[in-house]
Amino acid sequence: MDGPIGRRGFLHRAGAGLVAAGMYCRTANLASADPPALPPSPLLFHSPPMRPFRDEMPRLPVLRGDDLELNAATTTHRFHRDLGPSPALGYGGMEYLGPTIEHRVDEPLTLRFGNRIGTHPFTADLDTTVHGVGERYRTSPPCSFHLHGAVTPPDSDGHPERLVFPGQGLTHHFPLRQYAANLWYHDHAMGITRANVYAGLAGMVLLRDEFDTGAPGNPLGLPAGEFEVPMVLQEKLFTAEGQQSLRSTVIVPQGAWEGGGVGDVGVVNGVVWPELEVARGLYRFRVLNAASFSLWNLFFGNRMQFWVIGNDHGLLDRPVPVRDLLLEPGERVDLLVDFSVLAPGETVELRNDEAPVFQAAILGEVAMPLFCRFRAASRRGFTGPVPQRLRGAVGLPAAMPALEKPTVVRNLTVSQPYAVRMPPAIMVLNNLTFDDPEIEMPRQGTVEQWNIINITPDPHPIHIHLVNFRILGRTPLRTIDYQAANPQPPVGVKWTPSAENFLAGPEQPPAAWESGWKDIVRAEGGTVTRIIVRFPSAEELGFDPDATFPGRPVSDTGNDMAAAHYMSHGQLQGYVWHCHLLDHEDHEMMLRYRTVRG
């Protein structure tokens, strides 16, 4: 993760005295809502004071069926009882976020998506110099519906250039021939993904099977019904009037792209610092990091143990006990938490202590420390034990297979080249921008090893559409030596030199709870992150992943250069891979790729 771009340019120009003057630390006793102990940083925007735990954590409504309609629309939403209403976006008639879609694997889902948005909630914040963003987006913002983690035909995947403008719609077909898992859906429109998702366009999907039925008495022995709770975690900034703020710092002017900022309040299911009453027993939490920017280290305030039973693409072989875990934007974890250790009336908070990256910290940003609080009721809840096994035994799903041997090794780079421009950097993969033709073209039916070489100092969550993968490990990189031996050319020239001669230590295996199927991997700064990816064939999928499909041209191009750009993309093909820090994705850290027939 990088601090807002514009920040680094500022730091190069500013004197040390100004930087030091800005390095105030935001701290507060959240339980009593005491005022900050130190003055807040003058370089940052700050939310107004709010008392935590004044609102109940909402249960997101559930949507079921084989043929669903889901519209994105302009709304207003109150995030906390002490805040005024905020302009927002929502799916499916909700003020903010969208309903949880619950569906069974191997049963096709038809979803008819419509755009019913008016003026964008962040109309003044949209940067029309960013790739593909036009002036008309302020009053007529497009959408692109992406079911994140789904194994989806290319014409239904939510390609960022297949835009649906207000008044238009698009029907998506999802085969869902995959593992039971916690997926999610969100907007994916080119250049304004962060603005659309931050405004509210995100929701959960729970895929069920004969083992993970979601009903009491399921074969896995897992909590269900009221004891299974989806949790969409975010962090935000609010204005004094209680409106969502897309900007985090005065350094970046309004209307200019910002590389991401740390929020100062936690939001769960659309509510700031809520409280959930829990029965004294075992709960299953389906947790999503739906933030735009921040990596979190999640833990409970009393440091009690909990268990990870699954991640992006389903269950692990057995529960993994932890006391904290790292969660990047876009990642999901499936958790078991035992509240029987609490006395009636006792409370425990879900917290975070992951420090922001240097470029954010130097402006005064600190870890957003709190998401929510759980209060134990006197009643007993689910009293079943934590399962010993989840896969690989009689009556359970098959165990995780051994890692496949790759036949192709592919090097890819993550970098942040500078230029004489404002902002002074863009985010790139392979040193290319989205329209560059030199894309990756893995062959269908092959297994590849992707070496993700991150020469930035910060972690980036890398997401690949269509496929899932396994993490091999992370190896430290002698970044300066690597760059000195392989000077980076101007942006637009592919740059993917091998890092084999510049490794700085032994490879670190993934954490035990990361060992399952993933669609996002945390590529740590200054490391080579290796993953094993299998690219399925058309015969396996039941559809051609390399099929062309029509873009959706706008109805009135006028003098809009962005509209003319999209009119020129009459036929689209393939998928994308990108950083899931949404501002990075919006500003070139996203590339196309195709899976071609062998």
Image (spheres, rainbow, N blue to C red):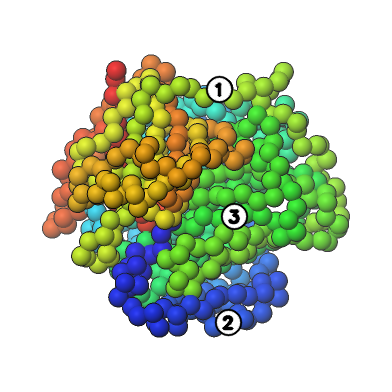
Distance (Cα) linking label 3 and label 2: 24 Å
CB-based contact (under 8 Å), mark 3 and mark 2: no
- Closer to the N terminus: mark 3 or mark 2? 2
Residue at 83% across, 49% down: 340
Residue type for callout 1? Ala
Residue furthest left in the image: 559
Distance (Cα) linking label 1 and label 3: 29 Å
Asked whether residue 556 appears in the rendered view, the answer is no
Number of numbered labels in the structure image: 3
Q: Name the foreground residue: 167 vs 205.
A: 205
Q: Which residue is mark 3?
A: 297
Residue at 21% across, 49% down: 489
CB-based contact (under 8 Å), mark 1 and mark 3: no
Q: Residues within 10 Å of mark 2 (few under 14, many from 20)?
A: few
Q: Would residue 147 be found to the left or right of residue 299 on screen?
A: left
Q: Which mark is residue 402?
A: 1
Seen in the picture, residue 573 relative to 82 is either above or below; the reply is above
User: In terms of secondary structure, where does tag 2 sit?
Assistant: loop
- Closer to the N terminus: mark 1 or mark 3? 3
Residue at 36% across, 39% down: 501
Q: Name the foreground residue: 346 vs 43.
A: 43
Residue type for callout 3? Asn
Quadrant of res 260: bottom left
Q: Residues within 10 Å of mark 1 (few under 14, many from 20)?
A: few
User: In terms of secondary structure, where does tag 1 sit?
Assistant: loop
Q: Residues within 10 Å of mark 3 (few under 14, many from 20)?
A: some
Q: Which mark is residue 38?
A: 2
Quadrant, the N terminus:
bottom left
- Closer to the N terminus: mark 1 or mark 2? 2
| Residue 74 location (% of width, % of height) | 41, 59
| Residue 598 location (% of width, % of height) | 29, 18
Q: Which mark is residue 519?
A: none
